Image (cartoon, rainbow, N blue to C red):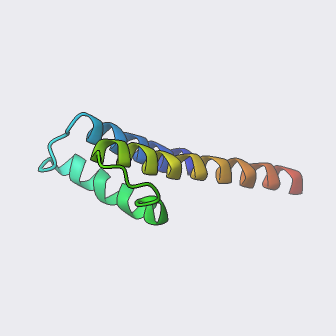
Amino acid sequence: MTAVVVLILVVYIVFVAFDANTGNTLVHRISGWADDLAWQFKDVFQPRNHKIEVTVNYGLAAVVYLVIGRILVALVRRIR
């Protein structure tokens, strides 16, 4: 599950970096999911360049999800 969340965030970062067509259904859907998943991280840093802002903030969200996911997996393995 964590991998899917991280993948969505990374794909969105790539879409923004390469100016993907926002009218495309896939791009629009991934954008919506990424916005929901990045909730508190969307405006942690506010550089003037939008691409840098998305890369840093959504990248931070991806790293946090990845770390929390790893911690939860380790805890579940210990319980077993």
How many numbered marks appear? 0
Residue at image coords 57%, 50%: 2
Coordinates of residue 17 in the picture (x, y in percent) = 29, 36
Position of residue 66 in the picture relative to residue 55 (left or right): right
Q: Residue at the location (67% across, 54% down)?
A: 68
Task: Answer left or right for 71 relative to 3.
Answer: right
Is residue 2 visible to us here?
Answer: yes
Q: What residue appears at the point 59 percent right and 52 percent down from the top-left corner?
A: 64
- Name of the residue lying farthest toward the top: 18
Residue 50 x, y percent position in the rendering:
28, 48
Point out the residue furthest to the left here.
23
Q: Residue furthest front?
A: 48
Image position, residue 19 (x, y; %): 20, 38
Identify which residue, 67 or 51, lies in the foreground: 51
The answer to whether residue 13 is left or right of residue 15 is right
| Residue 28 placement (x, y as % from top left) | 22, 53
Judging depth in this view, the residue of 74 and 68 nearest the camera is 68
Can the viewer see residue 80 in this picture? no
Name the side, left or right, on which 77 lies relative to 59: right
Quadrant in which the C terminus appears: bottom right
Q: Is residue 67 above or below residue 37?
A: above
